[in-house]
Image: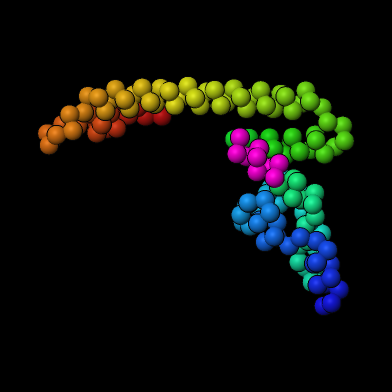
């Protein structure tokens, strides 16, 4: 038991990792499960003990996810950056693809904004039974 506590002190427990990085404990588990965050070693008692490399990686993952990169893209970028043979061209390709997805979403949102603004402008907002917003939602095209 004493050895287990000693090894635990040498590493970072998951709760402390969560606190240091601002990432929820369940999210850390998820990142481990899907292979984005490397599984940490365990104490004799089975407790996970994280190192500073996990703190760095988790901060990197968090930032990439905040920027909207998909888990698979984050994993690919981490693999390239951790391989010791970082290839900026590979990472650039991932970022270019992501940028095109972001731009497509922005175009979709601009179209959505236009449609909603036009519909809301047509809505009288009174007590009449006709409502432009309900009509728009009721006549939404099937996908």
Q: Position of residue 50 (x, y in %)?
A: 77, 57
Quadrant of image for the N terminus? bottom right
Front in this rendered view, residue 113 or 34: 113
In this picture, residue 143 sits left or right of residue 14: left
Residue 132 sits above or below residue 53 on the image: above
In this picture, residue 86 sits left or right of residue 71: right
Q: Position of residue 106 (x, y in %)?
A: 49, 25
Rendered residue at 17%/29% (across/down):
124
Q: Position of residue 120 (x, y in %)?
A: 26, 28
Rendered residue at 12%/37% (across/down):
127
Front in this rendered view, residue 126 or 76: 126
Q: Quadrant of residue 84?
A: top right
Rendered residue at 80%/35% (across/down):
81
Which region is colored magenta?
59-67
Rendered residue at 82%/27% (across/down):
87
Residue 80 sits above or below residue 51 on the image: above
Any magenta on residue 65? yes
Quadrant of image for the C terminus? top left
Q: Quadrant of residue 95?
A: top right
């Amino acid at each position: 038991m004493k050895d287990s506590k000693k090894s635990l002190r040498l590493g970072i427990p998951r709760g402390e990792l969560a606190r240091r990085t601002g990432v929820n404990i369940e999210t850390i588990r998820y990142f481990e499960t899907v292979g984005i965050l490397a599984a940490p070693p365990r104490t004799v008692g089975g407790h996970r003990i994280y190192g500073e490399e996990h703190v760095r990686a988790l901060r990197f993952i968090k930032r990439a996810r905040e920027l909207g990169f998909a888990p698979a893209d984050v994993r690919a970028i981490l693999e390239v950056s951790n391989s010791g043979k970082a290839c900026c061209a590979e990472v650039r390709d991932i970022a270019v693809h992501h940028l095109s997805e972001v731009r497509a979403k922005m175009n979709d949102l601009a179209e959505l904004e236009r449609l909603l603004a036009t519909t809301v402008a047509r809505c009288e907002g009174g007590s009449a039974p006709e409502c432009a917003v309900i009509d728009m939602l009721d006549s939404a095209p099937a996908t």
